[in-house]
């Protein structure tokens, strides 16, 4: 049996000691390797293009360019379509979380996360299969999207017209994804196997041009498919 390739991780943080600590942790995992480090947002974008990482662990507060703008530029680069970004920051607030997801991040965590949880988060983001803490994140997004002065969502998640090409079943699956259910839970709710549910999710991503489930959650709320405050 062929051994899977390790997850290639790029670390972007302006603190050298923090990067060193994360690098030691990641290198201790048999299924991961650090392929580059960046101390500024500009370097993060440059290294993303040269290191060909699978996952970028991105700080928000960095000189020259913050992590959210760096995330936005990486997500907008077609050559980096397979790169997933995990935002890891000291600043755990609604504005930063939603800004990171809108920019194209696949997950968001705070720096006081336990080491094992960070490694699991990297694996989760690398798989592209699940949004981190989907239930709380979905509820948070719903609260922020209620605000009258909320910023416009980026193109991949925008507009009800983007849902016009979805079948009734795909709309049902998208609704459950937006409410925080994983593939197995969504499948069970609709009488489908987890594999069939996953297939539906993949097709929905393709139709909406979404990079991952984070963008699906935002698309569902922005389009009005899921009402703010709705619970599953």
Image (cartoon, rainbow, N blue to C red):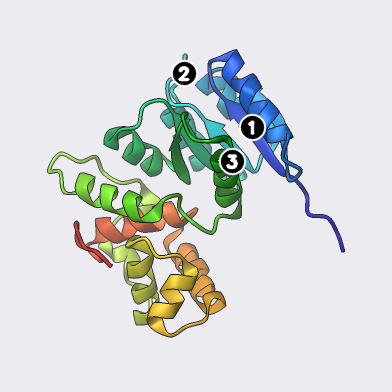
Q: Secondary structure at mark 2?
A: loop
Question: Image quadrant for the N terminus?
Answer: bottom right
Please state, as top left, top right, bottom left or bottom right, where the C terminus lies in the image: bottom left
Q: Residues within 10 Å of mark 2 (few under 14, many from 20)?
A: many
Q: Is residue 166 left or right of residue 119?
A: left
Disc number for residue 116: 3
Residue 213 numbered tag: none
Which of the two discs, 3 and 1, labels the residue nearer the N terminus? 1
Nearer to us of marks 2 and 3 is 3
Tell me where residue 97 appears, x and y as whole percent: 35, 38
Image coordinates of residue 139 in percent, x first then y, are 27, 52
- Residue 154: % across, % down: 35, 46
Q: Estimate how packed mark 3 is, as few (under 14), some (14 to 19) or many (20 or more) residues with alpha carbons within 10 Å.
A: few
Taking the image as shown, residue 63 lies to the left or right of residue 23, namely: left
What label sits on residue 10 in the rendered view?
1
Which tag is nearer the camera, tag 3 or tag 1? 3
Q: Nearer the viewer, residue 47 or 176?
A: 176
Is residue 105 visible to us here?
no
Q: Disc 3 and disc 1: Cα gap in Å?
A: 18 Å
Left or right, 188 with respect to 10, comes to left
Counting residues from the N terminus, which is met first, the one under dot 1 or under dot 2? 1
Taking depth in this image into account, of 52 and 128 the one nearest to the observer is: 128
How much space separates mark 1 and mark 2, taking CA atoms?
Answer: 15 Å
Give SS at disc 1.
strand
Between the C-alphas of marks 2 and 3, the distance is 25 Å
Residue 92 location, quadrant: top left
Query: Mark 3 or mark 2, which is nearer the start of the sequence?
Result: 2
Residue drawn at (78%, 54%) of the image: 4
Residue wearing tag 2: 62
Q: Does the image show residue 213? A: yes
Residue at 63 percent across and 23 percent down: it is 21
């Amino acid at each position: 049996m062929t051994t899977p390739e390790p997850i290639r991780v790029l670390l972007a943080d302006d603190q050298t000691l923090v990067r060193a600590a994360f690098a030691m942790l990641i290198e201790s995992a048999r299924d991961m390797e650090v392929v580059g480090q960046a101390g500024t947002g500009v370097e993060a974008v440059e290294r993303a293009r040269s290191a060909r990482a699978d996952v970028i662990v991105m700080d928000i507060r960095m000189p020259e360019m913050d992590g959210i703008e760096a995330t936005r530029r990486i997500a907008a680069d077609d050559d980096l379509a397979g790169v997933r970004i995990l935002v890891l920051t000291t600043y755990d607030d609604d504005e930063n979380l939603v800004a990171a997801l809108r920019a194209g991040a696949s997950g968001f965590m705070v720096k006081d996360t336990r080491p094992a949880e960070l490694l699991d988060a990297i694996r989760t983001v690398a798989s592209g299969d699940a949004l981190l803490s989907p239930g709380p994140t979905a509820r948070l997004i719903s609260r922020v999207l209620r605000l009258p002065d909320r910023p416009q969502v980026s193109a991949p998640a925008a507009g009800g017209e983007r849902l016009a090409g979805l079948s009734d079943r795909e709309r049902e699956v998208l609704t459950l994804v937006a409410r925080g259910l994983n593939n197995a839970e969504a499948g069970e709710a609709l009488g489908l196997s987890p594999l069939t549910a996953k297939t539906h999710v993949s097709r929905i991503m393709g139709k909406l041009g979404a990079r991952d489930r984070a963008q699906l959650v935002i698309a569902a709320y922005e389009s009005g498919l899921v009402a703010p405050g709705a619970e599953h």
